Image (cartoon, helix red, strand yellow):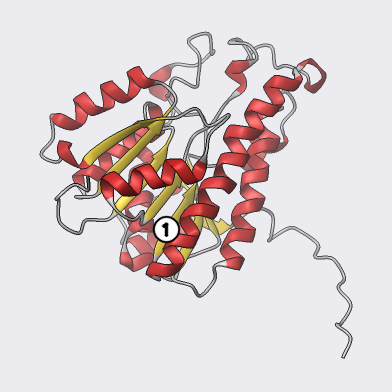
Amino acid sequence: MTLNTSNAPVALITGAGKGIGRAMALGLLTKGMRIAAVDRDEQSLLELKHLAKQSAHGECLEVFTEDLTSFDAVSLVDRVQQRLGNINILINNAGLGQGQIRNDYHRHPPKFYEVTPDQWLNAIAVNANSVFLLSQVVAKQMLGDGWGRIINVTTSLGTMLRGGYCPYGPTKAAAEGLSAVMASDLDGSGITVNVLVPGGIVNTPMIPGEAPFLRDELIQPEAMLAPLYWLCSREANNVTGLRFLANQWDDRLVGAEAAKLAGAPIGWKDIAVLPVTPQFKA
């Protein structure tokens, strides 16, 4: 049954139970949006629901327990639409990090040859495949509406290439490349595709207690909110194919000015050498 909460936009957020996803869900609730919070950890979703109920918009959040290593994107989107209506904003935030290999990976980074096939496949499933599968289903619906937002949380470019960060880095790089393709394919459709990353290590449960950092010196999840709000707004209707670093976003500036300072093309477009392409036959 669809919630009777006006025509507020519907945002589907993966990895919404904790960390960045939780901050995004609670933040967008304060903006009056309806939220479909997806996570494999049912307990974290219950905690999120409890936090949401403490706000004035708690009834606008619905939770969906789903393991993105093996799921049916069509079924998930159908269930979200049945309970909330058409999805206007898709935030592919879920990530499976190096903690699946060992908790002390910051001090003892694993070599790629130490990663098991299952660890590699699970990382691909969450960090790349789920982005493709959900975006594909949701984009088709958004095309009918003529408007939509797809926001992908990848990682810093250095992390994608750094030794000891297989499989997290390469699989997030796959999502980054996919984001560029999606933005091009959807250009002019009313659907924008952008990447939003923290710009450094974030104080979330993905960073184990064994990590050699002071937690209060890490980037806090709420740093993602100011650029997220702007990307979801009508002011960003023509903004697509860009990646934004949350830690470089100056929320003292108006959105467009902050975006210029914090944004760059998705992926490696500014440094890549494009292939030579012959002309088509007449």
Inspect this view and state whether residue 85 appears.
Answer: yes
- Residue placed under numbered mark 1 in the picture: 149
Q: Is residue 272 left or right of residue 74?
A: right
Q: Residue furthest bottom?
A: 282
Under circle 1, the secondary element is: strand
x 76%, y 21%: residue: 117
Above or below residue 81? Residue 36 is above
**Quarter location, residue 238:** bottom left
Indicate whether 76 appears above or below 195: above
Total number of numbered discs in the rendering: 1
Apparent side of residue 4 relative to residue 41 in the rendered image (left or right)? left
Up-down relation of residue 242 to residue 45 (above or below): below
Which quadrant is home to the N terminus? top left
Residue positioned 42% across, 31% down in the render: 219
Q: Residue at x 69, y 60 (%)?
A: 269
Asked if 247 appears above or below 46 in the picture, the reply is below
Q: Quadrant of residue 109?
A: top right
Q: Where residue 77 appears, x then y in whole percent?
A: 42, 46
The amino acid beneath tag 1 is: Arg
Q: Nearer the viewer, residue 83 or 138?
A: 83
Residue 16 image position (x, y, % from top left): 38, 33
Residue 225, horizontal then vertical, whole percent: 33, 44
Q: Where, quadrant-wise, is the C terminus in this rendering?
A: bottom right
Crowding at dot 1, Cα within 10 Å, few <14 / some 14-19 / many 20+, comes out as many
Q: Nearer the viewer, residue 229 or 136?
A: 136
Task: Tell me if residue 226 can be seen.
Answer: no
| Image-quadrant location for residue 27 | top left
Residue furthest toward the left?
A: 56
